[in-house]
Image: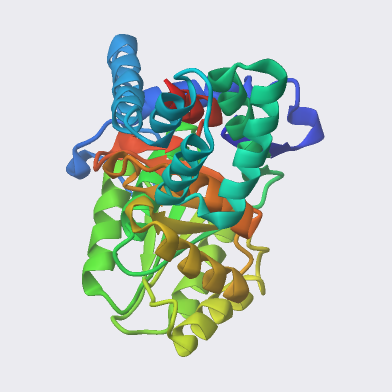
Amino acid sequence: MAFRFRRRPQLDETLPDVDQVVAEALAAVVPGADAASTSPLVTGTAAAPAAETAQAQVLGRMGRLRHRLSGGFGRGLLGVLTGGSISDDDWDHAEALLLQADLGLEGTERILRELKKAVREHGDVAGALKSLLLRELRTDRSLDLDLTGAPTVIMVVGVNGTGKTTTCGKLAALLVGLDQQVVLAAADTYRAAAAEQLATWGARTGALVIRGAERGDPASVAFDAVARGVADGADVVIVDTAGRLHTKVGLMDELGKVGRVIEKLRPVDEVLLVLDATTGQNGLVQARVFAEAVRVTGVVLTKLDGTAKGGIVFAVQRELGVPVKFVGLGEGAEDLAPFDPEVFVESLVS
């Protein structure tokens, strides 16, 4: 399940099934909606594509992911470990494959230890590998949405170039498809193009965009956006923060300030860290520093369709103790997908 709704008690019986709502949301996002015909204050105005078109989009995303990952470490492991008796050299080769796939030393050692035990007991390498990988990813990865009358606040953070602003826009598109009224905060005041980009997403999705002066105080913009969300009765406020190098202490302190200022009005429900899946272990270094500055609740892995490794998904969850909640599989508005561990593992091992 991609979303968890905190409901008003009297609404429990009237709200639709969440899984069905999510499926409908994916079908409701139309890339390239006519910005001129979409008011910033009107949500859900884009026409839903035909069911078969929406299904084709979903299958296309998953198909790209499966195709990309099918040459990754899962297939390599099965090639090494299913050719009859397994030698010490085979296990050494398997270890190298896992390390090259960005699982990290600790994760590699644990998976190999458990895999050796499962192979001795059952002999089913493929089944054991799938089971172990799924167990590594087992956790609640819902996006926490508040339906009690106050807006859910989501901060989106990360280094330069990971796709934070695009992720904010895609997430807004997904939530508007869930009939959520969304406010976007252009708190990346250091890059003028970021505010313009977010304004384009606002017009495209029907989300209201709050922006401030160029190089103004990011915390002030975030505060104004949350205040507007509270005043308008919005459902979700998404705060786009400036990309910052994880080595710059002053910028990381500023990020903490943005969170503290927001919490004068509303708690920050979610802090989504956007990581580029192609950066591998360097992404883990970034993640640790961000987790020290703000309370990261989930990860968005962008460019997952651009890597055949896949191990970064496991390493991120193990290192941070928070799950990958969304993955970016392309440039279109519909290309932000809730992360599905079963589809992911099946892609790796198929």
Question: What residue appears at the point 54 percent right and 84 percent down from the top-left corner?
Answer: 253
| Residue 63: % across, % down | 31, 22
Q: Residue furthest top?
A: 52
Q: Taking the image as drawn, is residue 209 in sight?
A: yes
Q: Taking the image as drawn, is residue 323 in sight?
A: no
| Residue 297: % across, % down | 62, 55
Question: What residue appears at the point 43 percent right and 29 percent down from the top-left corner?
Answer: 80
Quadrant hosting residue 33 = top left
| Residue 284: % across, % down | 49, 62
Q: Name the residue nearer the viewer: 290 or 256.
A: 290
Work out whether 177 lies above or below 149: above
| Residue 315: % across, % down | 54, 52
Quadrant hosting residue 196 = bottom left
Q: Residue furthest bottom?
A: 250
Viewport quadrant of the C terminus = top left
Question: What residue appears at the point 46 percent right and 21 percent down from the top-left corner?
Answer: 24
Viewport quadrant of the N terminus = top right
Q: Is 326 placed left or right of 71 in the picture?
A: right
Q: Is 123 placed left or right of 156 in the picture?
A: right
